[in-house]
Image: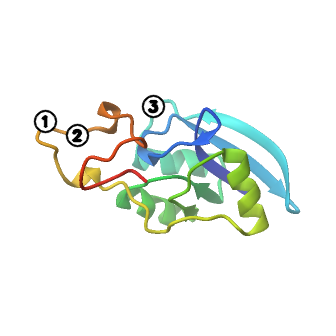
Amino acid sequence: MRIALTHENGQIFQHFGHTEQFKVYTVENGKITEKVIVDTNGRGHGALASVLMSLGADVLICGGIGGGAQMALANAGIKLFSGVSGDCDEAVKAFIEGNLGYNPNAKCTHHDHEHGEGEHTCADHGCGSHNCGEHSCR
């Protein structure tokens, strides 16, 4: 089994569509046999599902994720565990043990509105660490 996590500095990155790296674990017989960090090369949102497919990912663990990306992952046969934060290694350990806390309804909803300052992008606020009133990327 291959488990991918959105990754930044050892932590689960909180916005799937803006992730610059995945940390990918190979798990055999309940044990991690390999870990590798893979750059996304600037691909975003829907294209990231293709990146995960090419990596052979069976599972994605992430923070916030939009509806379109959720559908792309489902179409690719990749099982999604969203709404997760914290250390990547600890999250994979919890997943293997069957105690990963996640929120299947965690979504980044900021694509649906503006903030009065024009078009919003997570790069403006460092997604994962802000709350713009009506949404959070967690």
Return the disc, 2 or 3, that comes first in the chain's sequence: 3
> Tag 3: residue type?
Gly
Position above or below: 95 against 39: below
Residue displayed at 28% across by 38% down: 121
Where residue 43 appears, x then y in whole percent? Answer: 44, 36
- Left or right: 61 in relation to 104: right
Residue displayed at 65% across by 54% down: 57
- Left or right: 131 in relation to 75: left
Return the disc, 3 or 1, that comes first in the chain's sequence: 3
Q: Quadrant of residue 18?
A: top left
Position above or below: 35 against 73: above
Q: Secondary structure under badge 2?
A: loop
| Residue placed under numbered mark 3 in the picture | 42
Q: Residues within 10 Å of mark 3 (few under 14, many from 20)?
A: few
Q: Quick check: marks 2 and 3 in contact, CB under 8 Å? A: no
Q: Nearer the viewer, mark 3 or mark 1?
A: 1
Indicate the quadrant containing the N terminus: top left, top right, bottom left or bottom right: bottom right
Q: Is residue 83 visible?
A: yes
Q: Name the disc covering residue 133, or none.
A: none
Q: Secondary structure under badge 1?
A: loop
Q: Quick check: marks 1 and 2 in contact, CB under 8 Å? A: yes
Pick the front one: 38 or 138: 138
Pick the front one: 70 or 108: 108
Q: Residues within 10 Å of mark 1 (few under 14, many from 20)?
A: few
How far is the residue under mark 1 from the one under mark 2?
8 Å
- Left or right: 123 in relation to 82: left
| Residue placed under numbered mark 2 in the picture | 120
How far is the residue under mark 3 from the one under mark 1?
25 Å
